[in-house]
């Protein structure tokens, strides 16, 4: 699954300088190595991260000599207290080292005792690790900060390569048809000239050493002698961790063919010895070294293995790293949040757009149906009109009736009362009925209760009716006034509960019969028809 591996810039911190690598899937490319005395070191490294590495996420892999390891047992406590106890004990163990971390181990034997020691049920065993603060580390952190590249983490090379040693041992054992060894010693020379030895027990880091040796390419025999001396020293250390000659042991050496063969002839410890070139080891691990395969150094194997990890065995906690990564994590979170918001808005816009298109299509269909119905309606109206039936008149009448029903106007008693009050010789020129605005209805109207049932009498809505009467021009004003006054008296009898008043009297006379304006009884001298009209106002229902 190399195609799923992340692409990273790996900064390998060694004693002689800083190695810059790029890992992409299974491929490893060495960009450059910058000595610590490089002029304007931070700017040079920052530019390499940006230009040569494409500003890929940075993994800082620490491989200097000064690394501190210690096994400690943590007593059994509640899970929510365990992390606090580990942090406190880690600070007490390495009080002056700013970069530190703890790794829970699977083995249960007491630290410092042999493998035959009885398991200690008093707690869990942890591997405490620490790196001292230094100017070198600060310069690397400054270069990473200037590059503005995201940071994947800070890790120790021996810890992160312990599972690589395990995988190599298992593959070689399957190839040889034997069982995987309990102890594995991995030996590989670094570009700086140091010899890195990693010892694992049951797949976990047990010991690591970094010592200077001669270059294997210059004198393979001398190199084999130097490595043999360091290997024996390592085995003396391993025996303190419970190793015995009866235990199974794999020794894996990364070197040139001749140097590896010379070393294999010199080793006198019972083991399964394998010498591999970097390219052969990379082939077993699924790592393509490219141009680096021509060198006999093992650094590219460590870089390629750690660079493609999605999770590290032991991420180190460093204050400078938190200072760099925290703002970028916030920025990444904000970016993810913005992308999520944009996706949600896009989804909402798509939904609204689809709904709008659907509604638009439905409106279009209904508009076509309406146009067809209108055409059919017009044809039917024309056909009815040809038969003498006025459809629009009937519809207008029904609409007027419905409006009156909605306004609760009961006009039949009004019309009947006016018809009975009119004298046979009287006629109405205009009749208008309107519902009064609620603000014009008097407060003392409508609060009546039935004396038998005790229920409130619900009156129709308040309205007012105005009608005009026209008198012949030859009538005497006094006769017109008397006729209007008599009509008002009859209306009050036929329309009880209504307020009836005269809005305009004949010839604009007052109710007493006195003239308000000068007028003549001669029709020829007073041709104004309005002076022979009267207007009566009826408000109903009354008090």
Image (cartoon, rainbow, N blue to C red):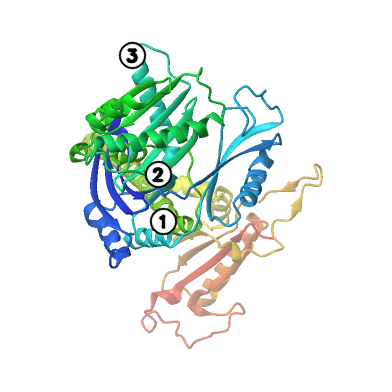
Cβ–Cβ below 8 Å for labels 3 and 2?
Answer: no
Residue at the spot of label 3: 176
Q: Is residue 331 at least partly visible in the picture? A: yes
Which residue sits at x=71%, y=36%?
77
**Foreground of the two, 494 or 466:** 466
Q: How many marks?
A: 3
Which residue sits at x=44%, y=58%?
327
Q: CA distance from mark 1 to mark 2?
A: 38 Å
Residue at the spot of label 2: 211
Element type at marker 3? helix
Q: Is residue 386 at least partly visible in the picture? A: no
Which dot marks residue 328? 1
Which residue sits at x=48%, y=56%?
322
Q: Measured from the top left, where is residue 424 in percent x and y?
A: 51, 56
Q: Measured from the top left, where is residue 57 in percent x and y?
A: 34, 49
Among numbered discs 1 and 2, the one appearing first in the sequence: 2
Quadrant where the C terminus sits is bottom right
Residue 124 shown left or right of residue 246 in the figure: right
**Foreground of the two, 447 or 302:** 302
Q: Measured from the top left, where is residue 194 in percent x and y?
A: 35, 45
**Foreground of the two, 312 or 30:** 30
Quadrant where the N terminus sits is top left
| Label 3 CA crowd tier, 10 Å (few <14, some 14–19, many 20+) | few
**Foreground of the two, 475 or 339:** 339
Quarter of the figure with residue 353: top left
Among numbered discs 3 and 2, the one appearing first in the sequence: 3
């Amino acid at each position: 699954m190399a195609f799923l591996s992340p692409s990273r810039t790996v900064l390998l911190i060694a004693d002689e300088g800083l190695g810059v690598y790029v890992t992409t899937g299974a491929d490893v490319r060495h960009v450059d190595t910058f000595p610590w005395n490089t002029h304007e070191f931070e700017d040079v490294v920052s530019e390499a991260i940006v230009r040569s590495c494409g500003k890929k996420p940075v993994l800082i892999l620490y491989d200097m000599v000064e690394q501190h390891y210690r096994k400690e047992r943590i007593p059994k406590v509640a899970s929510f207290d365990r992390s606090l106890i580990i942090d406190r004990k880690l600070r007490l163990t390495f009080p002056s080292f700013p970069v530190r971390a703890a790794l829970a181990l699977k083995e249960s034997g007491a630290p410092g005792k042999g493998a035959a020691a009885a398991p200690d049920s008093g707690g869990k065993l942890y591997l405490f690790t620490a790196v001292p603060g230094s100017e070198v580390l600060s310069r690397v952190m400054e270069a990473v900060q200037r590059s503005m590249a995201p940071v994947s983490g800070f890790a120790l090379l021996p810890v992160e390569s312990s599972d690589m040693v395990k995988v190599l041992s298992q593959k070689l054992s399957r190839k040889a048809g034997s069982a995987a060894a309990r102890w594995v010693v991995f030996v590989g020379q670094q570009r700086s000239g140091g010899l890195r030895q990693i010892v694992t027990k049951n797949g976990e880091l047990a010991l690591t050493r970094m010592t200077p040796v001669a270059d294997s390419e210059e004198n393979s025999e001398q190199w084999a002698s130097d490595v043999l001396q360091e290997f024996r020293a390592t085995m003396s250390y391993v025996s303190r961790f419970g190793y015995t000659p009866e235990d199974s042991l794999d020794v894996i050496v990364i070197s040139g063919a001749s140097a590896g063969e010379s070393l294999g002839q010199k080793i006198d410890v019972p083991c399964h010895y394998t010498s591999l070139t970097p390219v052969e080891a990379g082939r077993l691990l699924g790592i393509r070294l490219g141009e680096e395969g021509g060198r006999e150094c093992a650094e590219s194997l460590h870089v390629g293995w750690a660079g493609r990890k999605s999770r590290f065995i032991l991420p180190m906690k460093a204050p400078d790293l938190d200072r760099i990564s925290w703002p970028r994590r916030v920025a990444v979170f904000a970016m993810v949040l913005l992308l999520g918001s944009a996706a949600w808005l896009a989804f909402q816009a798509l939904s609204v757009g689809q709904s709008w298109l659907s509604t638009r299509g439905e409106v279009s269909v209904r508009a076509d149906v309406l146009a067809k119905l209108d055409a059919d309606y017009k044809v039917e109206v024309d056909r009815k009109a040809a038969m003498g039936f006025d459809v629009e008149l009937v519809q207008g009448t029904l609409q007027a009736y419905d409006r009156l029903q909605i306004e609760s106007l009961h006009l039949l008693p009004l019309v009947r009362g006016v018809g009975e009050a009119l004298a046979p010789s009287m006629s109405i020129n205009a009749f208008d009925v309107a519902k009064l605005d609620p603000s014009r209805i008097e407060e003392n109207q409508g609060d009546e209760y039935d004396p038998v049932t005790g229920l409130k009498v619900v009156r129709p809505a308040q309205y007012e009716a105005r009608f005009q009467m026209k008198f012949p021009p030859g009538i005497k004003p006094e006769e017109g006034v008397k006729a209007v006054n008599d009509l008002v008296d009859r209306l009050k009898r036929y329309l009880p509960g209504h307020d009836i008043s005269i809005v305009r009297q004949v010839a604009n006379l007052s109710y007493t019969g006195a003239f308000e304006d000068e007028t003549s009884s001669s029709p020829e001298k007073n041709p104004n028809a309005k002076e022979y009209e009267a207007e009566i106002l009826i408000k109903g229902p009354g008090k």
